Amino acid sequence: MKTFLLSTCIVGTLAIAPLMAADDNHKGHDHDKRFTEAATVFTEIMGADDKGIPQDLLEKANCVAIVPGLKRAGFIIGGQYGKGVLTCRSAGGWTAPSTIRVEGGSIGLQIGAGETDLILVVMNERGKEKLLQDKFTVGGDASVMGGPVGRTAKAATDAQMHAEILAYSRARGVFAGISLEGSTLRPDTDDNADVYGRKISQSEILSGKVQPTAAARPLLTVLGKYSPHETH
């Protein structure tokens, strides 16, 4: 059993290693593009006919993470890798976004490869505190469930309403399930330093005291459109 688990970890790592290498090789200064793509993904998902994220859930959310084009690869042993942004609610509205990475995978029916847009909606302070750790593990550090879709959250189950984090994924324009178990989410410290011109912690960025860049403002504007409440 130990040998099998070790082998699956190695294969899972090999599945996402080419994805990570390709991304880093084309890193450059792609931060503006990341913010723009995050705004586009969120706008498109919220504009889907009766299939967007319920607005009343967003109005209660503490944080929102958006990962455009999360890359998936693997056969039986899944792997995924993506770069996105994370912003949290403060007294002055949505904070300047922190750049983040999602890495890892899970054992399960993960046949094929492709890209999925991912949104994580953090529903309470406990979920926020866990997500802001240096390294957050899905399924290990907080409860993550697939979120309800529609104009309102009336169709949400009791479990969904009490989940710390709700996950939404979209592939080829259609909402689809995705296994995130065992994946990790962490701040992209090098990219954050490039964005804000100095070494800066994720907690400082999300404190509400850091000014967002011009490229991030469209994202914050569209978040404010669908979640206008400044405080809970």
Image (cartoon, rainbow, N blue to C red):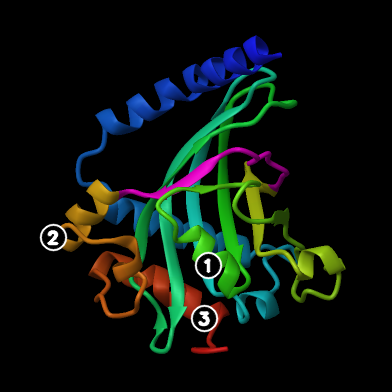
**The furthest residue to the left:** 197
Q: Where 84 falls versus 10 (above or below)?
A: below
Residue assigned mark 3: 225
State the image coordinates of residue 140 (x, y, percent, origin top left).
63, 46
Q: Check the picture and name the quadrant holding the N terminus.
A: top right
Q: Check the picture and name the quadrant holding the C terminus.
A: bottom right
Residue assigned mark 1: 128
Marks 3 and 2 sit apart, C-alpha to C-alpha, by: 29 Å
Residue assigned mark 2: 197
* Amino acid at the residue labelled 2: Gly
Count of numbered labels shown in the rendering: 3
* Amino acid at the residue labelled 1: Lys
Q: Main secondary structure of the magenta part?
A: loop
Query: Who's the residue at 45% across and 40% down the image?
Result: 82
| Relative depth, front residue between 155 and 140 | 140
Marks 3 and 1 sit apart, C-alpha to C-alpha, by: 22 Å
Identify the element where label 1 is drawn.
helix
Query: Who's the residue at 63% across and 56% down the image?
Result: 142
State the image coordinates of residue 116 (x, y, percent, origin top left).
58, 41
Query: Foreground mark, 3 or 1?
Result: 1
Q: Is 60 left, or right, of 27 in this rendering?
A: right
Q: Which of marks 1 and 2 is nearer the N terminus?
A: 1
The magenta segment is 175-188
Q: Residues within 10 Å of mark 3 (few under 14, many from 20)?
A: few
Q: Residues within 10 Å of mark 2 (few under 14, many from 20)?
A: few
Q: Is 132 left, or right, of 199 in this rendering?
A: right
State the image coordinates of residue 105 (x, y, percent, origin top left).
58, 32
Q: Which of marks 3 and 2 is nearer the N terminus?
A: 2
